[in-house]
Amino acid sequence: MKNPAMSLWLSAANSAAGFWMGHGANAVRRQQRAMLAEMTKAATGTTGKPKRRKPRPATKGAVKRKAR
């Protein structure tokens, strides 16, 4: 005969184990990503994302186009 109490307990334990395994795997991925970024910075000598270029200011005599 099956034991419904043990089945419920094992189901809850399996759910909790899956939850903690997922969190542990994500923590490892975060550490790997951070380490790879740090090694890439050291190897290439860059400090991060490239800076955005500012838009050129309009000239004094420029004529604005009308929207259609």
Image: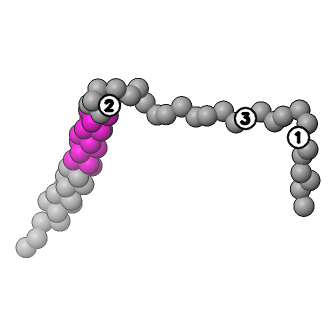
Which amino acid type corresponds to the residue marked 2 in the rendered image? Thr
Residue 3: x and y in percent read 12, 66
Name the image quarter holding the N terminus.
bottom left
Check disc 3 and report its element: helix, strand or loop.
Answer: loop
Tell which circle, 1 or 3, labels the residue nearer the N-terminal end: 3
Q: Pointers 2 and 3 in contact (CB under 8 A)?
A: no
Task: Specify the quadrant of the image occupied by residue 39.
Answer: top left
Please give the name of the residue rendered at 91% of the width and 44% of the height, measured from the top-left corner: 63
Is residue 33 rendered to the left or right of residue 47?
Answer: left
Which amino acid type corresponds to the residue marked 3 in the rendered image? Arg
Label 3: few (<14), some or many (≥20) within 10 Å? few
Please give the name of the residue rendered at 84% of the width and 34% of the height, measured from the top-left corner: 59
Bounds of the magenta span?
A: 19-37
Which amino acid type corresponds to the residue marked 1 in the rendered image? Ala
Q: Which residue is mark 2?
A: 44
Q: Nearer the viewer, residue 12 or 42?
A: 42
Is residue 1 rendered to the left or right of residue 27?
Answer: left
Check disc 2 and report its element: helix, strand or loop.
Answer: helix
Q: Is residue 36 within the magenta segment?
A: yes
Q: CA distance from mark 1 to mark 3?
A: 13 Å
Residue 36: x and y in percent read 27, 36
Q: Is residue 53 within the magenta segment?
A: no
Label 2: few (<14), some or many (≥20) within 10 Å? few
Residue lying farthest to the bottom in this orientation: 1
Q: Pointers 1 and 2 in contact (CB under 8 A)?
A: no
Q: Which residue is mark 3?
A: 56
